[in-house]
Amino acid sequence: MDRRRATENQNSKRARIRIGCGRTASARYLLRIANKDSYTPRDVQQVSASIRKILGSRESASHFRVSTHAVEFNIFADNEKELEEQKRLLTEGSFEIVSLRALDTAPKLVSKEEALAEGIEFFNAERFWECHEALEQAWHIAKGVERDAIQSIILTAAAFVHYQKGEEEICLSIMKRARAKMALVKAYEVIDFEGLERNIDGILDSEKVQLFKLLTSRPEWHDFY
């Protein structure tokens, strides 16, 4: 009986440990800081080491990604006081906080059009992880060919997430999946789908990742925020 209770306690303890970061479950936040030093995805290890040193713990931050204008990563805090302390440490370490977003709250339900507009805005701002999250709402609502079109954009965003993490081979692998999904779509009037295909073909042919923007036939979406 004691052995069984001990096993249950161990399992309960394991369940409280956040996978991949080695700490008990805490509130998660997506934090973005200005990329003032022109870091590239190849610098992600250097940047993550610097930020973790400032925060004083390897487990306090994870999932680092580098874009042209920002470095983004997840931080974990047990309460508001700890979160404010982490923000203070980063600011005193000469990092400019651009945005902070709670990740453990359910996303706001929006229409398909709003989700598409938000996803395209995130894509063009190189906020590919958030693009992926936004477009999933539209994908769940869409049907038929439009569903395949949206999924191909989601896969493209997912590929660029890995590029921002310095994982170019994984990026190219997922990009191939995105291109295969596009073959099922003859046209998608919401964006310049032919332009999207050309950009991805160029990446796959050269095996060199180049970021690009999505062009939309709905210019009002550029002023979504």
Image (cartoon, rainbow, N blue to C red):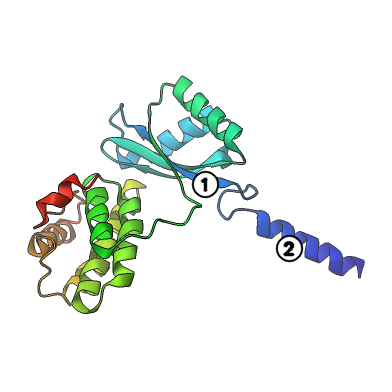
Task: Name the spot of residue 117 as percent of width and height, x first.
Answer: 22, 55
Quadrant for residue 2, please give it: bottom right
Q: For the residue carrying disc 1, how many other residues have a C-alpha within 10 Å: few (<14), some (14-19), or many (20+)?
A: some
Point out which mark residue 11 bears.
2
As drawn, is 95 to the left or to the right of 18?
left
Residue positioned 27% across, 68% down in the render: 151
As drawn, is 35 to the left or to the right of 103?
left
Point out which mark residue 37 bears.
none
Residue positioned 11% across, 64% down in the render: 193
Helix, strand or loop status at disc 1: strand
| Number of numbered markers | 2
Quadrant for residue 98, please give it: top left
Disc 1 and disc 2 in contact, CB within 8 angstroms: no
| Residue wearing tag 1 | 28
Q: Is residue 184 visible?
A: yes
As drawn, is 143 to the left or to the right of 203?
right
Which badge, 1 or 2, comes first in the chain's sequence? Answer: 2
Compared to 7, does 72 lie above or below? above
Task: Name the spot of residue 71 as percent of width and height, x first.
Answer: 36, 37
Split into 4 quadrants, where in the image is the N terminus? bottom right
Compared to 153, does 17 lie above or below? above
Split into 4 quadrants, where in the image is the C terminus? top left
Front position in the image: 6 or 222: 222
Amino acid bearing label 2 = Asn
Task: Name the spot of residue 178 as percent of width and height, x first.
Answer: 24, 67
Amino acid bearing label 1 = Arg
Residue positioned 63% across, 47% down in the render: 23
Q: Is residue 212 visible?
A: no
**Distance of label 1 from label 2 (alpha carbons):** 22 Å
Front position in the image: 3 or 120: 120
Front position in the image: 4 or 31: 31
Task: Name the spot of residue 53 as percent of width and height, x first.
Answer: 53, 30
